[in-house]
Image: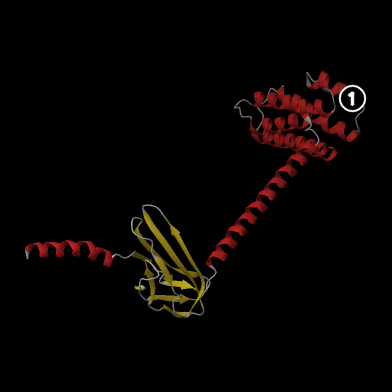
Amino acid sequence: MKRKFVFSFLLAAILVPSAFAAPSLKVTAPPAQISLSERSTLTLQLEWPAAEDPYEINSLEPKTENLELVDQNQSQETGAVVRQTITYTFRAIKKGSALIYPFEISYRKSETDPWSPILIPEQKIRVTSSFPLKSIFIGIIILLGVTALGYGIFITQKILAKKKAASEMPPPDPRQRIYANAEEAIATFASPDAKIKLTHWSNQLRAVVATYYDATAKGNSNTGLLLHLKSKGLPTGEWNEVSQLLEQLTEMQFSRQDIPSYDLDRLQKTLLQYIKGKIIIENSNS
């Protein structure tokens, strides 16, 4: 009796696992919410050890609501574990609730074996209005790219135009630098001694006049410069203006009397006005 019990137990240990062997199932559900422009996928993955006999899998088309099955694929990978993947791709029909009803896939080991079902649970999906976010994002990127390109072209053209304008400009007249330096020196030079200030102004005016009339070689003194200018036969108006300024400066430099600040200010303004006039004339002639 005891031997019969042991034999029955061993037989059950051998046969029962075979009877209940089945592929394991992994379900990858579709997203809970999709837009009308999106597609959703339901993936079923069945696995079993390669040591077992191969299984025949029968996959049916699931019944749906507000969804259209647009593609169904089945593939298999072999190795230590056999993996068979079934993929269903759906397209939403309209906005609202969508449903994949519960359905079955079947498996068996041979044609003589009955089909055994595996239940696939119900899948619920919410379909929302199609908003072209991706298209808008791509459009924004394209717009930014075009804007950046246009700005780059604009800046490049601007730089090239500046370079061209600079290359086409005539070289600066060195005399303008002399006039500008003299103008600044007369306007900014400060000294409590009026005679020192007059000497400084006289040197600056002499440099301007000698440069303007091309008499730099004769510009060592006001008197020498006037003699040279007289020999050039200047127009009466120009001669009177230059000679009066140089003579006034010489007279005030060697005067033994104190020079009022009012006279100094008036002379300074007259000198600056004369130099500005020469700057304007040179600019208009260039």
Element under disc 1: helix
Residue 278, placed above or below residue 223: below
Where residue 47 sits, quadrant-wise, is bottom left
Look at the image and tell me in which quarter the C terminus lies: top right
The colour scheme used to paint the residues is: secondary structure
Foreground residue among 156 and 199? 156
**Nearer the observer, 12 or 207:** 12
Q: Is residue 71 left or right of residue 232?
A: left
Q: Which residue is mark 1?
A: 230
Residue at image location 71% in from the left, 23% down from the top: 253
Q: Is residue 237 among the parts visible in the rendering? A: yes
Side (left or right) of 104 relative to 234: left
Structural crowding at the residue carrying mark 1, measured as other residues with C-alpha within 10 Å and reported as few (<14), some (14–19) or many (≥20): few
Say how many tags the image has.
1
Residue 246: % across, % down: 78, 27
The image position of residue 64, as x and y in percent, is 45, 79
Q: Looking at this view, name the residue that lies furthest to the left.
A: 1
Residue drawn at point x = 9 percent, y = 62 percent: 3
| Most foreground residue, 224 or 112 | 112
Q: Position of residue 131 (x, y in %)?
A: 52, 71
Q: Quadrant of the N terminus?
A: bottom left
Is residue 30 at least partly visible in the picture?
A: no
Residue drawn 81% across the image and 21% down it: 216
- Residue pictured at 67% horizontal, 53% vertical: 150
Return the residue nearer the eye: 194 or 69: 69
Does 77 sit above or below residue 197?
A: below
Q: Position of residue 159 (x, y in %)?
A: 70, 43
* Displayed quadrant of residue 124: bottom left
What's under tag 1, amino acid-wise?
Answer: Lys
